[in-house]
Amino acid sequence: MKRRREMEKRSELRAAIEELSMLAKVQPGDSLDAAHIPTKPFLHVCTLILQVLDKIGPTMAVLRQDIHQNIQRLEILCETDPTKYSNLIEMLKKEGSEGNARKGTSCSRAFLWLTRSMDFMVALLQRLVKDPGQNMEQAVEESYNITLKPCHGWISSAAFKVGLKLVPDNKTFISLLMTKDQNYDNLKEDMQTLISLLVPILEDIHSILRFYRLDRLKST
């Protein structure tokens, strides 16, 4: 309850920055096999990203549902052995050794798609920082095209295309991201900080996904 009350006073972006500050201290090192990604902070960041996507509206409904299910999948496995699976990499090792990593309901796939969802969010925030007046529909579509679309099949792409017309305008979305005590300059600073923290972490994660040969998996 205390954490929820604190969240109500902060924006999702600021809360994500705090979580990422903890993740940023974790380095994969020379050996990707020995990398460490704290499970709970990673999943909390994903949950905060989910809340930001909610503000885009029905367009993100399919992506939002996927993120929620993927978070749950990782949480369920983590609960079976909280100590061992406090490091997300242990989940990849487990499924890799069992030959289950590429299955549709695997935690490895869940981790992959959560990472791709954050790629999308970074791309969108980068566009809004660079050009605050950019058409929101265009910004969402361009961000989707360079992150998620190459990994989506025609069914997922078609579902996204249908919902694109429901994207709110730029001013509405930005106002939804701000807390009562914020102005646009504060929000822009938060977006830039979040991007600067998230980009190097995502680069490390993509290196790990390539190491475990998960980076080319696609959806329908």
Image (cartoon, helix red, strand yellow):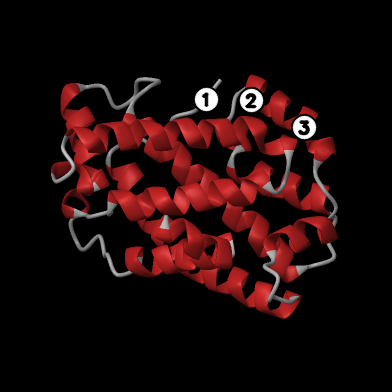
107 to the left or right of 132: left
The earlier-in-sequence mark between 1 and 2 is: 2
* First-in-chain label (2 vs 3): 2
The residue wearing badge 1 is: 219
Q: What amino acid is at disc 3? A: Gly
- Residue pictured at 74% horizontal, 77% vertical: 183
Q: Which numbered disc, 2 or 3, marks the residue closer to the eye?
A: 3
Tag 1–tag 3 contact (CB < 8 Å) = no
**Distance (Cα) linking label 1 and label 3:** 18 Å
Is disc 3 placed on a helix, strand or loop?
Answer: helix
Using the image as rendered, state which of residue 31 and residue 164 is in the foreground: 164
Which kind of residue does numbered mark 1 sit on?
Ser
**Residues at discs 1 and 2 in contact (Cβ within 8 Å):** yes
Q: Which residue is mark 3?
A: 163
Q: Nearer the viewer, residue 84 or 97?
A: 84
Of the two numbered discs 1 and 3 in the rendering, the one whose residue sits closer to the viewer = 3
Answer yes or no: is residue 85 visible. yes
Q: Amino acid at mark 2?
A: Ser
Dot 2: element: helix
Within-10-Å neighbours for mark 1: few <14, some 14–19, many 20+ = some
Q: Is residue 215 visible?
A: no
**In the picture provided, is 29 more to the left or to the right than 156?**
left
Up the image or down, 54 lies above or below 37; here it is above
- C-alpha distance separating marks 1 and 2: 8 Å
Name the spot of residue 79 as percent of width and height, x first: 23, 36
Residue appearing at x 28%, y 39% in the figure? 212
What separation in Å lies between label 2 and label 3 (alpha carbons)? 11 Å
Quarter of the figure with the C terminus: top right
Pick whichever of labels 1 and 3 is earlier in the sequence: 3
- Mark 2 sits on what residue? 156
Local secondary structure at mark 1? loop
